[in-house]
Each structure stands twice: as structure tokens, then as C-alpha cells.
Amino acid sequence: MGKANKYLPKFYYDSFLDIPYEYLAKKGIKALFFDLDNTLLENNQKTLSEENKQFLQQIQPLFKIVILSNASKKRLETVLKNNFDYIPLTFFHKKPSSWGFLKALEKFNVSAEETVMIGDQLRTDILGANKMKITSILVKPINRNNESLFSRLSRYFIERPYIKKIKKNNPQIYQQKFKNFVELEK
């Protein structure tokens, strides 16, 4: 994978609810790795909405659903309440490190080719998945206004310049994968 493409998602959807899951299942996808914050719920929410929880439970017969998040183990336990599997990532093994991805693939006995990673950040979710040759799906963050300082800095110094470069050099890819994702700061 070229350096310039390491942040390029395979697909983009406005929300995880918009992804064609039945199509993924027909294509042989057996596991879905989801980011938590700003993908399934806002950063400051303490529980999954009933709608999102029911949706995930509805697609659970088709896939192994795993939450792969840089959130603390305590936050994962609080939010997920034993409804979904997760891989707690330690300080030295946070995304985009391969460690969590490898651990999840091994624990749930699936290959990278049978897996999709769904998340809202290029630097963590998409880069990590792409390094592992896992299909990456970028979704629009639910609410950028309450993100951590680290996420805001990552978006400003990594995502923003990358997306601007794509917009300039490859408008077609920008239209397909980033137009709705980001409102570039004026």
C-alpha cells in the first residue's frame, strides 16, 4: 500500500446504519469490527441508543460483532453492558497498532479478508484496518463538537491536510469518499 493511500478507506457511508450489511454477508464477510465513540454513539454518551443497540443485535446473526475502540475498558463495560464483545486496548496497543486487530482476528477465528472495520477516524480506524488488509469503512462522525483534544488535533493535523490533498489531486475519490465526511474548517 502506498504511503498516500494508507488513510484511504475502501468505502464511505454517512452512518453505520447505511452500510449494506446483507451485501457484505453475501461477499463472505463474517466479522465486523466497530469503533465506539463517534461511530456508534457520541463521545459523552454513557449508553448506546436503543435504536443502535437493536440494529446491532438485528445484524448479529450474520456477523461476529466486535467493538475495537481506544476507549478505556471501564467505558466499554459501561456502554456495552455485556451486549457485545470488545477487545480492550492497552496504552501501548491502541489503534492504529496491529495488536488489537490481530487479537480480535485470533479470538473470533476470522481472517482479515472476512472482516470489515467501521470507524470515523482516518488515523486510527482506517489506517489500522488498512495496515492489516482489513476492508475499511469510514463513517461520518456523529458529533465532532465533543471530541477529545487528541481526536481534534488528529483531525486538524492529519485528516484535514490529507483530505485537502485528495480534493486537489483526485477530485473523483474526494467526491466518493470524503465529500460528505468532512466540512473543512473555513
Image: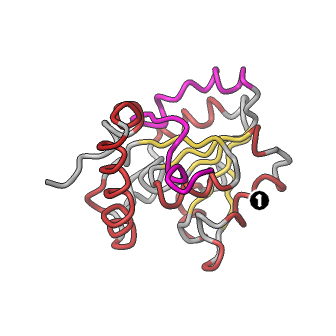
Crowding at dot 1, Cα within 10 Å, few <14 / some 14-19 / many 20+, comes out as some
Place residue 134 in its image quadrant: top right
Q: Position of residue 29 (x, y in %)?
A: 73, 32
Q: Is residue 4 above or below residue 24?
A: below
Q: Is residue 84 above or below residue 79?
A: above
Residue placed furthest toward the front = 169
Give the residue drawn at x 68%, y 43%.
65
Magenta span:
1-27
Place residue 178 in its image quadrant: top left
Residue placed furthest toward the left = 186
Give the residue drawn at x 13%, y 54%.
186
Q: Position of residue 87 (x, y in %)?
A: 69, 61
Examine the structure image and report whether residue 34 is included in the region drawn in magenta: no
Q: Position of residue 93 (x, y in %)?
A: 65, 73
Examine the structure image and report whether residue 11 is included in the region drawn in magenta: yes
Left or right position of 9 against 175: right
Q: Which of the pair 42/115 is nearer the observer? A: 115
For disc 1, the marked residue is 102
Type of amino acid under label 1: Leu
Q: Position of residue 153 (x, y in %)?
A: 34, 70
